[in-house]
Image (cartoon, rainbow, N blue to C red):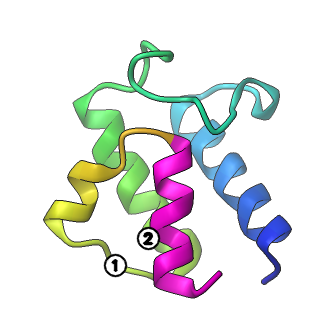
């Protein structure tokens, strides 16, 4: 999967879980910018991203996933940039 494909999959996954159009999702998307991103949605996002990319996140990594940008960075670490 290319970095572009990985980014598109991440955007699609976040949009689906938060029930938002993909065009509304950017690297700055976070619980501070999207009211639907509450604690339950956060757990759903983590599970959806794990399933979409075939990875597992530690509890600490899960807590660090506070924006799409940070999710992207964690994925790069897990999958290799």
Query: Where's residue 52, x and y in %?
Result: 57, 70
Q: Which residue is mark 2?
A: 50
Look at the image and tell me in which quarter the N terminus lies. bottom right
Task: Establish if 76 lies above or below 20.
Answer: below
Q: Are marks 1 and 2 in contact (CB under 8 Å)?
A: yes
Look at the image and tell me in which quarter the C terminus lies. bottom right
Task: Establish if 14 lies above or below 33.
Answer: below
Q: Residues within 10 Å of mark 1 (few under 14, many from 20)?
A: some
Query: Which residue is located at x 47 percent, y 59 percent?
Result: 48
Q: What secondary structure predominates along the stretch shown in magenta?
A: helix
Query: Where's residue 55, x and y in %?
Result: 43, 81
Residues drawn in magenta: 68-81
Label 1: state its secondary structure.
loop
- Taking the magenta stretch, the answer to whether it contains residue 76 is yes
Going by the image, does 17 lie left or right of 8?
left
Query: Which residue is located at x 26 percent, y 63 percent?
Result: 61
Query: Which residue is located at x 36 percent, y 49 percent?
Result: 65
Residue sitting nearer the eye, 52 or 11: 11
Q: Which residue is mark 1?
A: 56
Task: Establish if 5 lies above or below 37.
Answer: below
């Amino acid at each position: 999967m290319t970095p572009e494909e990985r980014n598109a999959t991440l955007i699609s996954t976040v949009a689906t879980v938060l029930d938002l159009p993909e065009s509304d999702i950017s690297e700055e998307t976070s619980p501070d910018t999207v009211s639907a991103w509450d604690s339950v949605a956060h757990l759903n996002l983590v599970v959806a991203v794990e399933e979409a990319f075939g990875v597992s996140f530690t509890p600490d990594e899960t807590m660090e996933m506070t924006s799409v940008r940070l999710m992207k960075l964690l994925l790069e670490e897990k999958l290799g940039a």
